[in-house]
Image (tube, rainbow, N blue to C red):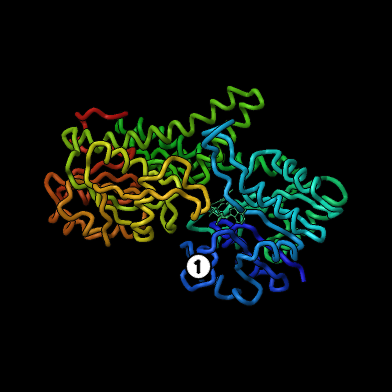
Amino acid sequence: MVKICCIGAGYVGGPTMAVIALNCPSIEVVVVDISVTRISAWNSDQLPIYEPGLNEVVKQCKGRNLFFSTDIEKHVSEADIIFVSVNTPTKTRGLGAGKAADLTYWESAARMIADVSKSNKIVVEKSTVPVKTAEAIERILTHNSKGIKYQILSNPEFLAEGTAIQDLFKPDRVLIGGRETPDGLKAIQALKDVYGHWVPEDRIITTNLWSAELSKLAANAFLAQRISSVNAMSALCEATGADVSQVSHAVGKDSRIGPKFLNASVGFGGSCFQKDILNLVYICECNGLAEVANYWKQVIKVNDYQKNRFVNRVVSSMFNTVSGKKIGIMGFAFKKDTGDTRETPAIDVCKGLLGDKARLSIYDPQVTADQIQRDLTMNKFDWDHPIHLQPMSPTGVKQVSIAWDAYEASKDAHALCILTEWDEFKTLDYWRIFDNMQKPAFVFDGRNVVNVEMLRDIGFIVYSIGKPLDPWLKNMPAVA
Ligand code: NAI
């Protein structure tokens, strides 16, 4: 029986391994982690992450050929194929601080593999890593090899949170990079055989190691760039009276461009886009490609601009101050159908409003009060470390309260800010909400989910990203 061990039981390791286990009953899959709480949660009925469809998949194979364990060394030493899916945060100190990837967790995983291995291994990079990481890992392993042979493969993960299970079942592509030597090609084939259980062969792409590593960074940079492009257009739409939804519909009809990922919003978030672009920028700079680095930096700058612009719209519309005013925050996760708040634009928007002394009442159907308080007090980039190693703030933010539902968050509020596109925000009883709010009552829709005309008929003053402006907003100073 082939044995797989995955180091890192997070948003990638957990779902990916569950789908492999379900589709490959003949393979034993063990997911290991240094976080005892995470592994206990995987072994309970309350999984550590929320992802539609995940529960069902895990239920079918947990205890059959899918296991979660903290006995890392045992399972690594027994495995034939080891996936490494650990955190790769942005460095906060030293060389490359604020841009380069911090490979501390990756390196410690590699050293541990070298320490405990007694048989040949295929080591698979699942984490997103800088180009040439495989070479560094190879060096660590071969310099400590005790005669054991290692093959390193790059198999970056392209799943999107919120749709991870369907993405894993029907991936657009599976990418496997490896050495173009006989042993390298054999290792590539072994991994192809795993995915071959359910992924059609023409969807499995094989490349050299560096192409695979760079393709992941490039794909995330292209995706984020699309969002920054449409968000840049949203500012121009507001200035000219064009409607960004109409513009992106017309633009997306061009088959060379395509309709997906063209929704204007308060900005992109999630654990990957910013981190991976910063990483790409750093690699470009290290290779003397300043113009290329600056080009990609703009994608992040536009994203920051969009979040600032949103905060400024809120404050300027409300007589240039939100001091002491209650604002209902609808949604905190970085997108719908996930409880993940890493780099969510809601953090920057909330911090911006708190900077102007607002009182916030935050509601999100999947994010805990504790997580929101942590996010609002944590330093930049600290979130991307294993949870038990993250610094805890002794106190929460006093001006922030957490609401059980959208109605509680909006009660007596001067304004609502919709920051995540949860479906339930489309069908709220906005008449009831209006009745219970201070007047004038504002809605700032950062995800374009509400029916603007209907809300204006009810009496709200509505701002919707990239849409023709409410008459109220037309004479207000617009942007950052
Ligand atoms: P995560 O933070 O949810 O999970 C990482 C896990 O690794 C944590 O549970 C941590 O405790 C564990 N860990 C760290 N060092 C360890 C060690 N030495 N031994 C054992 N366990 C260790 O992170 P996530 O989101 O799963 O991301 C992992 C990697 O995958 C990152 O490189 C990320 O950029 C990449 N990625 C993430 C995607 C996403 O949507 N979240 C999508 C595609 C790639």
Q: Residue at x 67, y 46 (%)?
A: 107
Q: Position of residue 137 (x, y in %)?
A: 73, 45
Answer yes or no: is residue 185 visible: no
Q: Quadrant of the C terminus?
A: top left
Q: Which residue is drawn at 66% across and 52% down?
A: 109
Closer to the camera in the image, 443 or 75: 75
| Residue 25 placement, left or right of 375 | right
| Residue 166 placement, left or right of 29 | left
Closer to the camera in the image, 426 or 245: 426
Q: Position of residue 467 (x, y in %)?
A: 31, 39
Answer yes or no: is residue 381 visible: yes
Q: 10 Å neighbourhood of mark 1: few (<14), some, or many (≥20)?
A: some
Q: Which quadrant of the figure has residue 473?
A: top left
Count of marks, rendered view: 1
Q: Where is residue 381 in the image (x, y as percent from the top left)?
A: 48, 42
Q: Position of residue 54 (x, y in %)?
A: 52, 66
- Residue type at numbered disc 1: Ala
Q: Which residue is drawn at 20% across and 36% down?
A: 317
Q: Name the residue under label 1.
A: 41
Q: Is residue 106 above or below residue 357?
A: below
Q: In this view, does 111 lie above or below 194?
A: above
Closer to the camera in the image, 379 or 354: 379
| Residue 143 placement, left or right of 477 | right
| Residue 81 placement, left or right of 88 | right
Q: Quadrant of the N terminus?
A: bottom right
Label 1: state its secondary structure: helix
